[in-house]
Amino acid sequence: MVFLRGALDGNLDSQVQQLSNANVSDRLFNTKPSGSSIAFTPTPTADVVDYFVAIYAPDGKLLATAGPKIANVPVFPSSFPQQQTQIKGLTPFTVDGTKGSAFRASVSPYQVPGVSTLYTQLVALPTASVDKIVTTFLGIYTILAVLTMIAGALVTRWLVTLAFRSLGQVESTAMSIASGDFGQRLTDIEPEHTEVGRLKIAINAMLGRVDAAITQRDATVRQMRRFVGDASHELRTPLVTVRGYAELYRMGAIQSAEDTAQAMERIEKEAIRMGAMVEDLLALTRLDERREEVVFTAVDLRPIARDAALDVRATSPLRHVSVIDTTIPDSAAPVAPAAAPDPGAEQGRRRGAPPTATLGIAGATLSLLRRKPRPVPATHAGGAGQPPPVAPVDLPPDMSRSAEPGPFGPVMPPIVLGDENRIRQVVANLVANARRYTADDSPIELAVGVDAAAGTGWIAVCDHGDGIPVQLREQIFQRFWRADTSRTRETGGSGLGLSIVAAIVETLHGTVTVGDTPGGGATFRVSFPLSQSRDAADHLLIETQPLQRLGAADLGRIDPSPADRRGGAPTGTDDMGSDAADRS
């Protein structure tokens, strides 16, 4: 605005200088001699011009004025000496107006034609036009500025709203999560180089972790409630039995020595069973909370298998037990061709492995033992006091030793990294489970071997009972789960044996699988890392966080590896049934 005012004032000053230098008084005044002076009278032309002129005598006295007839006229000085005219020259100066509006004026000497006397001519131009232009421009500028500010604010609001429109989705998603819908996720992800895009990606990652944590918490709460309910039921049952016999004795219903002895025997058995159940619960608690430090050492699986077989032979003399060592080189045993893969092979349950890892148990993928139908154990050639004969067994391809050198050498002993006592407990629980759910004369086979490709040593317990249906294999490792849903006590199981197996195997960074035994029955196989695969110090660095049990949707099928397809016959067996009988 200051620059505009200065430009307009400069233009006005130029105009007034030009008029002052042009002797405009000749057009605005008529001159007539009057004595010793000259009389100046305005002409009609003075009414149509836009400037004012004043004539001063040589002594500085105002003689006449001329200009348009308007309300605002300049207030000319009453005297203007010629000395002052010479001092000012054509330099413009300001003259006040009668209505407050100023004028820009300029003076110059004026000589009337035919007269030698010099007069002073003062020309003044009004600044009203300049003021009007400035006022108009100021109004227009103000209006435009206001409109520009409003438009800028609206455009800025629109741009900000457009830029942060995605934050509205973040807000709505947050409100949905606050209402309990933890499955909400942000969609329409912007490019990662934008702040909003990175924010959405970070929020989705956070929501995924929160949802997983809440889901795991809910599953843990449900499992804990089910565990507490089952534990209460299991512990209440022997207590009810003990209380019942105590009440019978108090009421006098048990009087004879025989009845008293029978009652005491039942009370003792229930107390023993309850004590064993409490010990199992304490063992599971210690495993869950990692109270006991695990000391990893090199453990040979072969003595463990043989000791377990001897224990079974001692407690069940009529049961045929075989130990199969697949790592013993036997040049006389030809390698049998592998059977064609069975597309209907059952999938085992694997604990502690990635969800994509699978193990087919039945058929050629993992045929633990291939046996002929069991003979009737009542009468046979060896007499009634000897265990029934068992048909020879053939090892499937993946349980036989590989003819080609593996990453750990051509022949590897099943020496693994682990805790020997805990591995023995695992095998003992699996053998006890096989004894519990099979007939007294049903054979049991224990096999040990090495999986060179996976770098693990394994031990398998095979029974020939009714087997485990596929739909139940997801539940057998749950605590207090038993196949007999009526909770009868014929088998004497508490439903914690396989849970302890799974917990111990997980602690030792191993895997446990279950599947069908060819010919009928169930086969449990546990695998542990070979001691050559890593040092004990490195093994301790493996995270031992609890892993979720695999569901049916997590189990898939895998094709037999080249080592699996080679197949082979058993390289060595330790028949604990026949050999022990011969030694006796």
Image (tube, grey):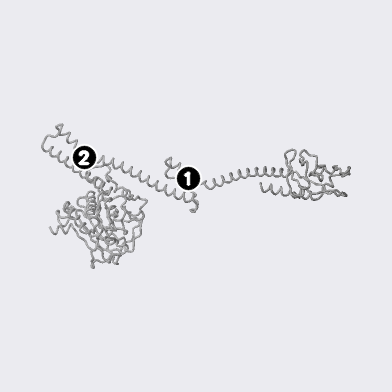
> To which residue does mark 1 refer?
170
Tag of residue 289: none
Q: Is residue 55 above or below residue 336?
A: above
Q: How far separated are the C-alphas under marks 1 and 2?
A: 57 Å
The percent position of residue 318, horizontal first and vertical second, equals: 17, 53
The percent position of residue 246, horizontal first and vertical second, equals: 17, 35
Tag of residue 238: 2
The percent position of residue 273, horizontal first and vertical second, equals: 20, 43
Q: At label 2, which amino acid type do we have?
A: Pro
Name which residue lies at 61% across and 44% down: 149
Q: At label 1, which amino acid type do we have?
A: Val
Q: Which of the 4 image quadrants contains residue 271?
A: top left
Q: Secondary structure at mark 1?
A: helix
10 Å crowding of disc 1: few (<14), some (14-19), many (20+): some
Q: Secondary structure at mark 2?
A: helix
Which residue is at the front of the view, 45 or 355?
Answer: 45
Q: Which residue lies most toward the bottom here?
A: 331
